[in-house]
Amino acid sequence: MTRVPIAGVGMTAFGAQGERTSRDLFAEAASKAYDDSGLAPEDVEEVFYGNYMGELAEGQGHSGPLAAEAAGVTAPATRIESACASSGAAVRHGVNRIRNGDVDVVLVGGAERMTNLSTADGTAGLAAAADALWEINAGMTFPGAYSLMANRYFEEYGGTREDLAHIAVKNHDHAVENELAQFRRSIDVKDVLTAPDVCSPFGLYDCSPMSDGGSAALLVSESFAEERGLDPEVAIVGTGQGGDRMALQDRASMARAPAAERAASAAYADAGIGPDDVDFAEVHDCFTIAEVLAIEALGFYEVGEGIDAATEGETAIDGELPINLSGGLKAKGHPVGATGCGQISELTKLLRGDHVNSDAVEDAETALAHNAGGTVASCVVTVLEVTQ
Ligand code: COA
């Protein structure tokens, strides 16, 4: 396990800002990461940039070099596309390049512009992350796919819509003080259960929103950090990626997420830890049921037992294992290409003590990010630790 220090992080606010281009959003995130790290564009040797639907939303492909240019860099730049796990995968590519000894400074991150599209067009664009032949042709959308997973979970392991509602309530509560979050208002279980229906069992508050946003991080080698006297307080100590069959009907179970199990197992082995060592986590709650599948796949809960965690308060800010202290995708927002590195940004600040919710995890040493693509056909898990 080679540690990869995080020299600096930056994020735009996530929310409806559809007048801004994704290059503009990434430029802001990168600029904040430079300020946070004390590094400059000239220091960057390579860029990995996550973006999912630039062609549809902006008519823009080949966005790696464009994002690098927006960040003031002409170094080699590659766009990484892994649906909603795009920037988690971008972070992983950066980590691997540094660990290989190929480069010392990598700018990673991502951006997505979504709210310039209508909800119908955005939904169709997101659906392209499913199997075009077998799912999209049959009318599959992402709220539809995850609602199938939720209903299957209820069938196999039990649980109710109300249990899911507690997840939405918790994540909205966590976002109230987060100035970068899209929805900074508390809601209660009744609000969730009486909200407009989206796709049974989901109502409005079971879903992450359409969002625009950017995220960035500057990863460095330990030797570079030492040479430049950077002294980063947080490092990436483990990374893992898992895959699965693309279409839901081809999976052994629709109520499990084996790609996340595989990603977690690889990341834990890489970091030399197990699930019990994790103090808190950001997980990919694109729909309320996704948080349940995540905390089970990560080994925090036995299969079939994650559904009660929010209801019992265990994953709340004052619980034993706080989950999604940023507000999660549900309340912080989900500009898909920016989400994974956004999790890294939030966790870094939470561990350093300069996040508004840091007091809740004052003595924490280890945190984890879980970033899923599609209906978890791809998943990246990243483990972060304080360095001192
Ligand atoms: N949670 C809470 N409030 C939401 C919301 C959400 N997910 N989505 C929208 N809202 C709010 C808006 O802020 C707006 O509030 P206002 O009237 O006070 O301004 C209101 O609800 C209506 O917004 P609108 O954008 O018209 O909603 P919509 O009905 O067109 O779309 C969803 C709502 C849930 C269908 C849409 O956000 C969606 O498709 N989400 C899923 C995105 C997705 O699949 N991501 C990929 C995951 S893998």
Image: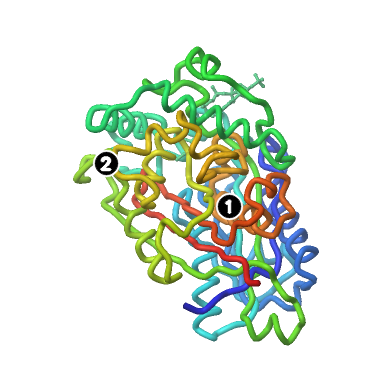
x and y percentages locating residue 34 in the rendered image: 76, 66
Real-space Cα separation, disc 2 to disc 1, in angstroms: 26 Å
Determine the residue positioned at 43% across, 36% down: 309
| Vertical arrangement, residue 206 with respect to residue 294, above or below | above
Circle 1 residues within 10 Å: few <14, some 14–19, many ≥20: many
Task: Identify the residue position indicated by label 2 in the image.
Answer: 248
| Vertical arrangement, residue 18 with respect to residue 88, above or below | above
Nearest the eye: 221 or 315: 315
> Mark 1 vs ligand 1: CB under 8 Å?
no
Give the number of the disc on residue 157.
Answer: none
x and y percentages locating residue 204 in the rendered image: 51, 22
Residue 108, located in which quarter of the rendered image?
Answer: bottom right
x and y percentages locating residue 74 in the rendered image: 69, 74
Give the number of the disc on residue 343.
Answer: 1
Circle 2 residues within 10 Å: few <14, some 14–19, many ≥20: many
- Do callouts 2 and 1 mark residues in contact (Cβ within 8 Å)? no
Q: Please, what secondary structure does the residue beneath circle 1 have?
A: helix
